[in-house]
Image: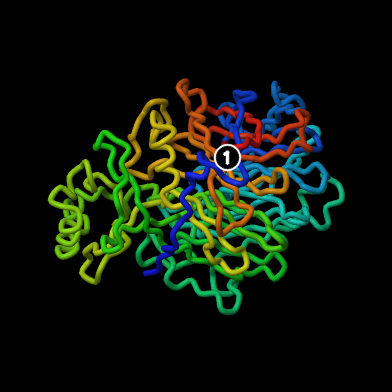
Amino acid sequence: MKIRAKPCVICFLAFAASMHGALDMAFISRYQAKGAEIFQYDPRTQKVFSTASGSVPGVEIIDFSNPRKPLRTQIVDLSEAFPTAKLDSVASVAIDPTGRGLGAAALIPENSNVNPGRVGLFDMRTGALLGFVEVGFHPDSLAFAPDGLRILVANEGEFSSKGPQAQGSISVIDLQDLTILESVNGLIVNTYGFTPENLATGVDLVGLRSNQPGAAPEVFLEPEYVIGVGQKAFVSIQESNAIGVFDTETRQWVAVHDLLLRMHDIDPSDRDGEAKLFETKPEARLFHIPMPDMIAAYEVEGRSYILTANEGDARPDGLDVARVHELGRKGLPPLNRRYKRELSDLYGPHTFKNANLGRLEVSIVDGLNENGEIINLHTFGSRSFSILDADTGEIVFDSGSDFERLSAQFGRQNYNANQEAGDFDSRSDAKGPEPEAVTVGTIDGRHFAFIAMERSGFVFIYDVTDPQTSYCVGMMDTLGEDGLDLAPEFLQFVPASDNTTGLDLILIGFEKSQTISTYSLVPTTVE
């Protein structure tokens, strides 16, 4: 059992005096998009390229030359991506950082466990479709390498309850020989799973979390989100609670970092009628599995750090999760009698009532003894964000209980809401606010992380200039009272030098409402 239990820095500094002040978000505009799950702003063309769903699935191109009034220009139609299968979703979009004008979109077909995915390539300047290349199974995320010489694709190989299990992998699309965009059909693509020949010497997959008991690592590892840092790709492997590091030069996985467990206070109940955190005593062995979705990177004094939004995720078929009060029923593993008694001794006779731990959703594949009894409780997601040293994988910071504590104190009406304004406390039994997206930006020489809560709609801002002592400097309730923006899924920081307002901006994509909202960022002094 591996636990990361270093105390976090509680970020009440956001609302008290601090030497560096706070950071406010001011609403600028809202754009009704065709999807908005993932997008990329390009400063050269001053356009936003966003995933689009609906009758014309593809990439929506938005004129962002006036951020106060974004305008749709066209949609790159990707509906004919698969000759023998139907396009299920446009999962991600990325844009060329070198100015060649190449755009790319990750495309998932129906029955993605047997049909390989594709990447659609298009001309960012004209919107012309250039062609498709085949990648691995269920490509969920893609990104250009920082030097523009490769496109990196995280192929999730998502678990399927029907048919064979596809393998998770990373695909590398080589662009070194790309001289004109029309030549994309000759691009070389290589895909690398987690089989032994793709692991560097010393890389060990033993002990990583699996939601498919008995399956080999090359089957149960599911890459979720990818970013490029130098010559390496960093990939969140959500269901296995890990970060994989792939060297794009040696073409091997050079590290797979276990993200360990967390132990801090959470609100476990949606039936207690209040915003109340349950004290997680060490002897209670109530652990939280971070399981990050989106990740981001930044550099401090020549050293790179990885930020993780610790969302948590159960299997699509839900067969690895149950509520505490259901344990031991209908074939579910029971709580070990001694452990159950220990919890009652710690917290009293009402420990397992719905107003306490009874309705909390926990894993039924973690924390079991040799008799199949649960001796440690594990929740999905840690309701926090973390910062890792990119070289070593060491966790140097975790926000702990901050998100729930601060939203209870300053954003009470939408505390642990479920994508609906005023839906107070309805997600406490599951993953709470559900940290989904994270990005980082630099303002006046200081680095700030922005972390969006998919369910409650809050966006928290942390000063991460000194990673080990990061602290909160602001928060925004994007759900508000009107509920026009629902389910933030993606964030992008746009510096003042890259847009026409002269202001630092944060763009937020909302999956459920299919909106993109723009906020300005203004440093303030806290009295």
Q: Position of residue 235 (x, y in %)?
A: 58, 58
For the question of whether residue 153 can be seen, the reply is no
Quadrant, the C terminus: top right
Q: Position of residue 481 (x, y in %)?
A: 45, 22
Compared with residue 72, is residue 492 higher up or lower down, i.e. above or below? below
Amino acid carrying mark 1 in the image: Phe
Residue occupied by mark 1: 490
233 relative position to 211: left or right: right
Q: Position of residue 434 (x, y in %)?
A: 44, 43
**Residue sitting at x 44%, y 67%:** 208
For the question of whether residue 350 can be seen, the reply is yes
Compared with residue 291, is residue 203 higher up or lower down, i.e. above or below? below
**Residue sitting at x 55%, y 39%:** 474
Given residues 290 and 415, the one toward you in this image is 415
Q: Quadrant of residue 81?
A: top right
383 relative position to 360: left or right: right
Q: Position of residue 520 (x, y in %)?
A: 66, 31
Given residues 94 and 507, the one toward you in this image is 507
Quadrant, the N terminus: bottom left
**Residue sitting at x 65%, y 51%:** 134
- How crowded pointer 1 is (Cα within 10 Å; few <14, some 14-19, many 20+) is rated as many
Name the secondary structure under disc 1: strand
Question: Which residue extends farthest bottom?
Answer: 201
